[in-house]
Amino acid sequence: MTNDAWDLARGHIRKDIGAHNYTTWIEPLSFRSLEDGTLSLSSPTEFIGKWVMQNFQDVILRHVAGNGHAASRLVCGAQAHSSARPSPRETPDESTPRSRARQENTLDKRFTFDSFIVGKSNEMAHAAARRVASDGTVSFNPLFLHGRVGLGKTHLMQAIAWEIQEAHPEKRVMYLSAEQFMYRFVQSLREKATMDFKQLFRTVDVLLVDDVQFIAGKESTQEEFFHTFNALVDQGKQVVISADRSPADISDLEERITSRLQSGLVVDLHPADYELRLGVLQHRVDMFAAQNPEFQIEDGVLEYLASRITASIRVLEGAVMRLFAYADLIKQVVTLEQAQDALSDLLRASEKKLTIDEIMKVTCEHYALRMSDMTSARRSRTVARPRQMAMFLAKRLTPRSYPEIGRKFGGRDHTTVLYAVRKIEELIAQDTQIAEDAQLLQRKLEG
């Protein structure tokens, strides 16, 4: 059996066990020999070797035999078949293109900086990610990105990994989810291979961990994550973390980890505004049109979708993919009516019926007030101005009339609401802080 025959077998194994299992466990293996029915493979660590023998031995042997090579036993480990000195071609070399490809297989090729659309809501996160991926000095470590699902955290993290691997192929870059980190740690405990685990994670140059909120409440995993984090930062190695909320807002996360995560740069990815949503739609349409020039959308459709679908960037991209498939079937220019029909379920899901109570709640949280302050008779500026802001937002974001809004705010007259709306509009044009508050609150409520 040759290396080429092993590569052929691996292709069938990948189809059998799935891309995730393949890239995690099979891709790191290299062929050593096949003698007397024993297939000998080399793995980066004993831990990976043991896991492969326990969980994938049957499927590996089946596909090797399916290619005409008799194999009844698997030996897989860091010292597998050590009696035979590996040839230069078989010696693992992290600087070779083939080894770099192993790392790249865990990344999505779509998630690069070139394909990331920048807007006001994500420009800070994009700039920070660019800095980490550049050759320049980075004054913050770690970089912590947070925001709700579908706003681009994973895209930016993988873009960092791609950029560094391209510019510095000699560097060891590891990207994985917090769940994968926890899974590997638990398995290393079961297999009594914690030293292999530590060596694997503490010798990387850049570590990127996605969705770190999943280790909250997992005491042993948090302990190991803390020590791994400290070891890398102390060595001057870059760490990038993402979560669906800020470190301080992740419950059941140890205080020392929260403190460490906050010691670098913490950046919030806000919900996409209209301009960014439209930019994403136009970018995706241009990509599809480049592949199929016959794909055309009637003027006004993208603007309509950008104003209606506010859930996330991911949902917007899914909407364009569906329109592309629809256009391919009907072989016509997609009209607004056809787009509404094809995306009816997404449009219904995006019809968020915002209530005045929700507006009051979010405004109170922003200004650190109580809900009762919104309906009270208090007239101090610290209460009156936020109340006016809430009235302004209620009029802008709901179909309620001035009298209806007034009744929700403690039975106030409609002229009071009208004055509040005009006052905030006036202040937005004059006071940058008021303008920023109004914009931030509207993003939170529309998101």
Image: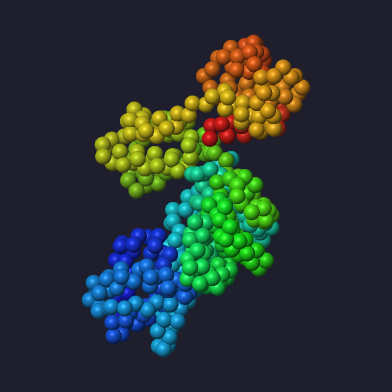
Identity of the residue drawn at 67% across and 66% down: 234
Q: Quadrant of residue 285?
A: top left
| Horizontal side of residue 152 vs 425, given as left or right | left
Q: Position of residue 374 (x, y in %)?
A: 66, 22
Picture coordinates of residue 183 (x, y %)? Answer: 48, 61
Residue 100, above or below 118: below
| Residue 402, visible in the rendered structure | no
* Number of numbered discs overlaid on the protein picture: 0
Q: Is residue 344 above or below residue 118?
A: above
Q: Nearer the viewer, residue 424 or 68?
A: 68
Image color mode? rainbow
Vertical arrangement, residue 216 with respect to residue 68, above or below: above
For the point 61% across and 52% down, the residue is: 253
Q: Quadrant of residue 133?
A: bottom right
Image check: 430 left or right of 322? Answer: right
Question: Is any atom of residue 234 visible in this view?
Answer: yes
Residue 279 appears left or right of 14: right
Tell me where residue 428 sits by quadrant: top right
Answer above or below: position of 145 versus 275. Answer: below
**Where does the N terminus fall, quadrant-wise?**
bottom left
Name the residue furthest right: 380
Q: Position of residue 335 (x, y in %)?
A: 34, 30
Residue at x-position 48% and y-position 29%:
352
Q: Position of residue 32 (x, y in %)?
A: 37, 81
Residue at 53% from the left image edge and 32% from the top image edge: 446
- Of residues 246 and 189, the one nearer the viewer is 189
